[in-house]
Image (cartoon, rainbow, N blue to C red):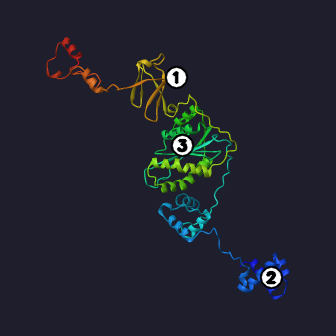
Amino acid sequence: MNQTDRDRLVALKKAKDGKMTQRQAAEELKISERQVRRLLALLRKVGDKAVLHGLRGRSNRRIDEEQQKKAVEILKADVYKGFGPTLASEYLAKKHGIEVSKETTRKWMRAAGLWRARRQRVTEVHQWRERRERFGELVQWDTSTHDWLEGRGEEIYLIKMIDDATSRLFGRFVRSDSTAENMGVLDAYTQRFGRPLEFYMDKASHFVTTPKKNHPVRDEPLPPTQIGRALQELGIGWILAHSPQAKGRVERSFQTAQDRLVKGLRVAGARTLEEANHYLETEYLPEWESKFTVIAACADDAHRPLGKQHNLAAILSEVEQRVITNDYTFRHDAKVFQILRGDVRPRMRGASLRVEVRRNGEVAARFEDRYVELKECQPAPKTSTTAVRKAAAKPGASTTGKPAKSKWMKGFFQRPSPPLGKAIKISNATS
């Protein structure tokens, strides 16, 4: 009984004892005289409980104890270990058909010892940057090396791209954070959405060329990496972040993924790269889009379509320059390639051509504006220099490359002196 109920009870008892009229009691309680008479009759019958509503403590929306017990038993399973109330309420509804609010789930989990609120700590506050206005105007790009499969399978990495204006997400699980794998994700992104205006990325070695130590500082800029060159050819700009906080949107999305995505993969039983990508594509990314994306300030899409000049297989490959020799061959990766006669053109000898190693391992070469047909040749066998010298040397000649020492003095004093002419011939001899 609260204070309002006590005040009502005092007024009713005064009316019952004749210390005030029923009209005065009705005016004080702001109810009708008829209601006062009903309350007085109930007061004589049940006592002080007359001022309490008959439905107090009862709710038509109250969930029965059996459903609560069922939900708690489900959440006690190992697969739901570490789930918070919000995520747990979503999985109870999606997987088990138990529709409860996150606050009710929180109350159940706290009572069962499955959840304990963490103390909020004050951290350093960074000034938030305003979102870009259009979808595709700026896309943040990063990789996470978290234990996504929790030891159930091979080590995998998550490469993620998140739009700055809408928080729309795109990502792929890969086996390594390499140039080829990042190019594969860039290929899939541009084919789905087009070419964004700019990417926002960190200073990883596959994004920016690292200056060499003990080398003199050069005035000219360092050459771009393979990804930098590919972005130039696609007409996409890029910005390098100086700190993790600068690309905070993608960093915070990784924090969310390391909670929700890891637990979703656990529930789905994903053990391989293919299973992880299937769950990411079919469940996590659509769920992210429905819950966490926002509407851009401007409805215009800043992505630009791919043109005929954008050959993704050629652009998103490892590109190097090689010099054509006089016999129309060039070397690459310890192999010799011959340009077929039908593709030989003027100005080729001594000129450079573009060599592309595609992501599927295929090697293609382009001279000026046209690709040429190639044939891999077997390099000439290497012969030993020592063997060549021995084969070319005369009998008794030195094999060290130095002139042989004259032996005319050998036994000179043990025999009579030869005539002068004969002595000259002996001194000029080499053996």
Left or right side of 330 for 32 = right
* Residue beneath the point at 58% across and 50% down: 288
Crowding at mark 2 (Cα within 10 Å: few <14, some 14-19, many 20+): some
Q: Residue drawn 50% across and 32% down?
A: 313
* The residue positioned farthest toward the top in the image shown: 421
Residue denoted by label 1: 369
Amino acid type at mark 1: Asp
Q: In this rendering, would 405 be left or right of 176?
A: left
Q: Measure how far apart labels 3 and 1 are at the Cα level.
A: 32 Å
In-image side of 31 versus 335 (left or right) = right
Q: Residues within 10 Å of mark 3 (few under 14, many from 20)?
A: few
Viewed as shown, does residue 351 lie left or right of 107? Answer: left
Q: Nearer the viewer, residue 275 or 346?
A: 275
- Amino acid tagged 2: Ala
Nearest to the eye among marks 3 and 1: give it: 1
Considering the image in quadrants, where does the N terminus appear? bottom right
Is residue 213 visible to us here? no
Could you tell which of marks 1 and 2 lies nearer the N-terminus?
2
Q: Are marks 3 and 2 in contact (CB under 8 Å)?
A: no
Query: Which residue is at the front of the view, 316 or 431?
Result: 316
Report the disc number at residue 11: 2
CA separation, marks 3 and 2?
Answer: 78 Å
Marks 1, 2: nearer the viewer:
2
Estimate the x, y position of residue 261 in percent, counting from the top left.
Answer: 53, 53
Locate residue 422: give its quadrant: top left
User: Which residue in the protein does label 3 denote?
Assistant: 204
- Secondary structure category for the residue under label 3: loop
